[in-house]
Amino acid sequence: MRKVIYLILVVLFIGLWLLMMNVFSGDVVFTNSFFVGEFSIHYYGLILGIAVLSAYLLAKRRANKFGISASQVDDISVWLIVSGFVGSRLYHVASSWDYYIINPVEIFFVWNGGLSIFGAIIGGLIGLYFYKKFKSSNLNYFAMLDWLAPSVILGQIIGRFGNLVNYEAYGIPTDLPWKMFVPVANRLSPYEAFEFFHPLFLYEALAGLLILLILLNFSRLNKSLKLPKFCGQIFWIWIGLYGLVRIFTEYLRVDSPYLGSIKQNMLVAGLMVVTTIIVTMISIRNQKKTEHESIST
């Protein structure tokens, strides 16, 4: 069975690679949707649905390791999907308020894109806090974050392909071999005369895959590196590494919102890295202090 799954994955990878080559060259141009009978299905929504389902299945597979029951997985998933979705949309709308104040109806047009991972993280953290407060006080909050971090990364990896089909969140023009064609209608000012751009979605997807492998194999890596352990460590590794990735991609991105002269998302990503360093140092110090006190007594 495992060999069949691997074979299917290899075939899917080859098919995806061939499709991307044609999309990057401009030989294939995505439309926003396709029809199944009389029903219009938006690529963006379909990809997000696959991302959420994949994240859920991974979370369910890893739940036993964290003492989380199947019913709790389902309950937590509902809370996170709702709070993460609302947070991701509100962050995007707030970041582009000058546009949405003129076009308020488009706030609800989520199929056109405009879901921020930063907002999803904030919304998810809030949703998880209230789940613990009102539904299950016996679960450790940071242990749940360690459990969920790989699932969120998997969802990010898949969800980034939504940026591809919507031709959004791309980088500055480039002539690199992996340059991505962007249709005229999706080119932002002042880059209308350029055809090819950095495929930032691919950079983030590949970086996310590396982070996912690190998180899923963290126990093995931790034994080799002999790193101090603390609750929430996997979550903070994700936050810190993803912050570093976003600093790089935001530097190249052409549609980032600004706070004064600073790119807003780059600032948030920098805060993620700094916070990770501070929390890690404090947690390790507290752990060593506790171990020292236990030895003394």
Image: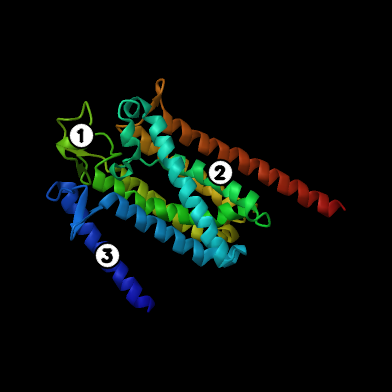
Verify CB contact (< 8 Å) between mark 1 and mark 2.
Answer: no
Q: Which residue is mark 2?
A: 126
Q: SS class of the residue under badge 1? A: loop
* Circle 1: residue type: Arg
Res 268 visible? yes
Residue 245: name its quadrant. Answer: top left
Please tell me which residue lies in front, 266 or 291: 266
- Amino acid type of the residue that numbered disc 3 sits on in the rendered structure: Leu
Mark 1, residue position = 187
Q: Position of residue 108 (x, y in %)?
A: 34, 40
Residue 192 in which image quadrant: top left
Given the current orientation, which residue lies at the most extreme top position?
260
Mark 2: which amino acid?
Ile
Report the residue marked by disc 3: 12
Q: Secondary structure at mark 2?
A: helix
Q: Nearer the viewer, mark 2 or mark 3?
A: 2
Q: Residue at x 16, y 40 (%)?
A: 183
Q: CA distance from mark 1 to mark 2?
A: 35 Å
Q: Is residue 70 above or below residue 44?
A: below
What x and y, as percent, mark residue 150? 48, 56
Residue drawn 46% across and 36% down?
A: 269
Q: Identify the residue at the far right of this view.
A: 297
* In-image side of 285 versus 57 (left or right): right
- Vertical order, 296 against 1 (above or below): above
